[in-house]
Amino acid sequence: MNTREYLNLHKIDLLKKLNNEVSPKNPEFADFLYHNLDKMDTVEKYILLRKIITPRQTYHMLLEYEFWERKIEPKEMKLDELMSEIMKLINRYQWKTGGYNMGSHIWDKHLSGSKLCQVKDDEVWLTNTVPIKLINSETAYLKRLIDMINSLSTTFTSSLQTQKYYRDGAYMLIIVIKKIKI
């Protein structure tokens, strides 16, 4: 066994020991990183990273990656099928990858004939609120959500509208889903 192999085996033994003993707020672990981080390969870094990232943080990071990178193949759908898929998207991502400042993790659904909104035939509105001062923090999330909704169906399109909602100092967010006219 040459010197490099010996040092690698020694490093792996040390990593295993640290992997079993380290907690996120361990000064000895931080000191170990200070002296060894630049010498480690990617696998060794991932082993150590698992010690400072909780399973919940790992799940959140992976879900966020999925949200921003997922490509959806559009299908021809009826309105009720589309609404089911939209609600799955919202339930999966709202308050997990964005939308943290919105009034609710549930979007209210309004159909034509609604007493609260003037929804046209072949339209559905989904509404939520966000405080006026926090609207900018939700822009990227909302844009991506609309892009995902638009990629679900070849027969419907969606857009985001905002209206000042004076009663609560908030914006009313309205996702308008319409049938594409051919």
Image (tube, rainbow, N blue to C red):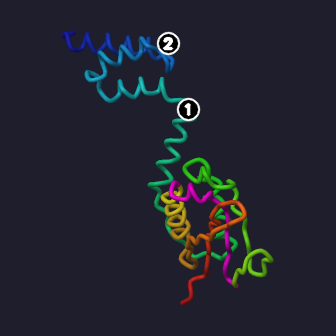
Question: Can you tell which quarter of the image residue 149 is in?
Answer: bottom right
Q: Quadrant of the C terminus?
A: bottom right
Question: Can you tell which quarter of the image residue 1 is in?
Answer: top left
Q: Secondary structure at mark 2?
A: helix
Find residue 55 and name its label. 1
Q: Which residue is mark 2?
A: 21
The location of residue 180, given as percent across then percent down, is 56, 83
Question: Can you tell which quarter of the image residue 30 is in?
Answer: top left
Q: Which residues are magenta?
A: 121-137
Height in image: 8 above or below 166? above
Q: Tell me: 106 left or right of 26.
A: right
The residue under the point 68% across, 75% down is: 124
Q: Tell me: 92 left or right of 30.
A: right
Height in image: 33 above or below 134? above
Height in image: 107 above or below 53? below
Q: Which is more toward the observer, 1 or 111? A: 111
The residue under the point 49% across, 51% down is: 66
Find residue 2 and name its label. none
- State yes or no: residue 127 in magenta: yes
The location of residue 83, given as percent across then percent down, is 67, 68
Q: Which is more toward the observer, 119 or 103? A: 103
Which amino acid is tagged 2?
Glu
- State yes or no: residue 10 in magenta: no
The residue under the point 56% across, 55% down is: 134
